[in-house]
Amino acid sequence: MTDDSLSSHLHEMDLSPDSAFTAQANGTADLYDAAAADHEAFWAEQARSRISWATDFERTLDWDDAPFAKWFVGGSLNVAHNCVDRHVEAGNGDRVAIHFEGEGGDTRTITYADLQKEVSKAANALESLGVETGDRVAVYMPMIPETVFTMLACARIGAPHSVIFGGFSAEALHTRIADAEAKVVVTTDGQWRRGKPAPLKAAVDAAIHHGDDESPVEKVLVVKRTDTDVEWDDSRDVWWHDLVPGQPDTHEAQPMDSEHPLFILYTSGTTGKPKGIFHTTGGYLTQAAYTNAVVHDVHPETDVYWCTADVGWVTGHSYIVYGPLANGATQVLYEGTPDTPHQGRWWEIVEKYKVSILYTAPTAIRTFMKWGADIPAKFDMSSIRVLGSVGEPINPEAWLWYRKHVGGDKAPIVDTWWQTETGAIMISPLPGVTTLEPGSAQKPIPGISAEILDDDGNPFTEPEKVGYLVLTKPWPSMLRGIWGDPERYKETYWSRFGPKYYFAGDGAKYDEKGNIWLLGRVDDVMNVSGHRLSTAEIESALVSHPSVAEAAVVGAADETTGQAVCAFVILRGDAVDNGEETVQELRNHVAKEIGPIAKPRQVMIVPELPKTRSGKIMRRLLKDVAENREVGDVTTLADSSVMSLIKEGMSSGSSD
Ligand code: WT7
């Protein structure tokens, strides 16, 4: 579709809520009024109505020591009790919690009663390995039920988990284990990827035996998933199947303080060192449950919900584990890739389990667009009634395709903006309430306040002017800090526009109707397939290669992945440029240092990098080159001939 026909098509569509949908929706228009009338009373009501507290809280919000928030002060609760036990106690033990679908077609149905037993056994097992309240547990696992059991078992004990995405390398794993001082690691022998086993435990071994550092890891608990050969250390390694099944299937869940840390999740920032974002108990669970109810519109008695994210990212934490399970929902957990064994696998799963709510990422939708609409057309997807999108802006064309070919031309699409730091959805339409606007996340949900500021930090509302998105009031699932680095927390999020505003790092604008449009990151953070990567982290991986003198990385627009990693590299004087071979070596080096997700699409060997007089690399100009554009204003360059040198002398290689 051309841009013109796309916009006239959009113009003709009626995207106001369907009255039958509205009649049953969890979200209602008066939530906005209630939240605006009394912000704290609104959240106190959400906390009390959606969550079971062992001790009620005395104060809703303590912001005296801003930006360090305390929510639901004095309250205590157990997250695993809320996500599991209370549903069994309420008589819903027979309800399916998880329909697990393995990549190879093996399945497992787990009811809430089963889940209670599995989580209890896992909690007893972790305790037998010495895990106590407050200890950190690293989780490096694929998308299998044991991963969910492990996370909930940690929550049950009050041992914060740090889940590390299975696509990260041993190097990345090492940094994260060391930073959180994890005492136990839970992993698998391997993971299935496109029908083949890929080793996982081997990376844990390498992370533990990293250099001369003494590892904090005392025990490694290993699930057998792929029958991959593993090296074994008898004093440290324990098979899950030897330890867990024999444990008692009951476990007393102790209430934790509302502000007890629930988990740490590492995310990329603007420097090379990843940030351990940490979340706590009561506020996080409240907002995860609330948003899953009013934004995804989950009705636990009737819906089958499926969030396709990996548990290694925040989306998997909030919208596979904590939100839906706190609400007692039935969900699908799928282990594999979308094209194994065929490109209709997802739609086959939708048909099989009658999935009614699907939550996924624009990059996946664009991939399906490439594969063709005839693929989903082969399956019965009439069960779908709500669609969600997350991770990056969804372009109107992908929005329309999603609505038509997945949503039967009727399902509302919720474009949800949020971050690892925000813990839960912040900006999104409410299905059944909001008239949709394809491409825009639209407005803050009830209970959340956002503004757009200009360069001087002044809020404005005029349409089409580009500014910075900020959040103006504390919210229950906000990060409580960066693990071990309170100064970096203040500096990163609460200083750019002063202590009153949380600076999200995203550019944004309003349209004529007052909808918010997110315009991508304004800092040196890239978004590749909805995964956050830092330019600095990849640059430091590149310069750790003996042939590299200097490196600059930019995120260039990419049709499928949103952005793609493009690296510009200056080789050392004594290094030999073997053209394509050198390029591939450097790409593989990044994959080894950080993980395959960070592997540059392109590496360009250049004689110089464009720098300002103060030595700052002008990534904007490199982006022009990477996106094949006429190079912009070069007047602030120390040496303005550099750009032509780059364009002439560039030898580049591209992706597999
Ligand atoms: C960054 C956060 C939210 C969980 C997954 C990513 C971008 C996220 C949207 C959206 C436009 C979006 C932002 C944000 N982003 N959702 N609906 N529209 N941009 O979490 O890795 O912490 O990344 O993802 O740039 O800052 P994350």
Image: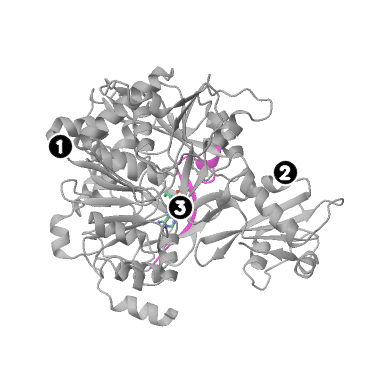
Badge 3 element = loop
In which quadrant of the rendered image does the C terminus lie?
bottom right
Which disc, if any, is residue 544? 2
Q: Is ligand 1 within 8 Å of the beta carbon of the residue shown at mark 2? A: no
Which residue is located at x 17 percent, y 35 percent? 93
Which amino acid, by three-letter code, is at mark 3?
Gly
* Marks 3/2: CA–CA distance: 33 Å
Please tell me whether residue 49 is drawn above or below residue 438 in the rendered image: above
Please tell me whether residue 51 is drawn above or below residue 590 in the rendered image: above
Q: Is residue 497 magenta?
A: yes
Q: Which residue is mark 1?
A: 92
Q: Residues within 10 Å of mark 1 (few under 14, many from 20)?
A: some
- Is residue 262 at least partly visible in the picture? yes
Image coordinates for residue 236, horizontal then vertical, percent: 52, 22
Q: Is residue 91 left or right of residue 141?
A: left
Q: Earlier in the sequence, mark 3 or mark 2?
A: 3
* Marks 2/1: CA–CA distance: 54 Å
User: Which residues lie in the magenta part?
Assistant: 491-511
Q: Nearer the viewer, residue 307 or 273?
A: 307
Q: Is ligand 1 within 8 Å of the beta carbon of the residue shown at mark 1? A: no
Which amino acid, by three-letter code, is at mark 2?
Ser
Q: Which residue is mark 3?
A: 195
Which residue is located at x 66 percent, y 51 percent? 588
Please tell me whether residue 3 is drawn above or below residue 297 in the rendered image: below
Q: Is residue 111 magenta?
A: no
Q: Is residue 241 left or right of residue 197?
A: left
Q: Residues within 10 Å of mark 3 (few under 14, many from 20)?
A: few
Badge 1 element = helix
